[in-house]
Amino acid sequence: DQVDEVRGMDIIVVTSAQTDDEARELLAGFEFPFVKA
């Protein structure tokens, strides 16, 4: 297959984490891929 253009998706996840580090750890546990944009 040939890719004619790059496509993506933005997903918003709301958690009850108190800090960014807690939220990252939680999402990493679900194997969310993190990409710096």
Image (tube, rainbow, N blue to C red):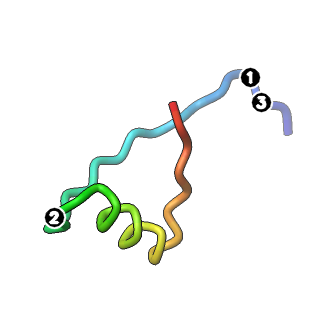
> Is 32 left or right of 10, judged from the image as shown?
right
Instruction: Inspect the image, locate mark 3, and give the three-letter code of the amino acid beneath it.
Output: Val
Q: Where does label 3 land, which residue?
A: 3
> Is 11 left or right of 4, judged from the image as shown?
left
Q: Residue at x 84, y 32 (%)?
A: 2
Q: CA distance from mark 2 to mark 1?
A: 41 Å
Residue furthest top as drawn: 5
Q: Where does label 1 land, which residue?
A: 4
- Position of residue 15 measured from the top left corner of the image (x, y, whole percent): 19, 64
Q: Where does label 2 land, which residue?
A: 18
Q: Residue at x 77, y 30 (%)?
A: 3
| Badge 2 element | loop
Q: Give residue 26's mark.
A: none
Circles 1, 3 touching at the beta carbon (< 8 Å): yes
In front here: 37 or 19? 19
Crowding at dot 3, Cα within 10 Å, few <14 / some 14-19 / many 20+, comes out as few
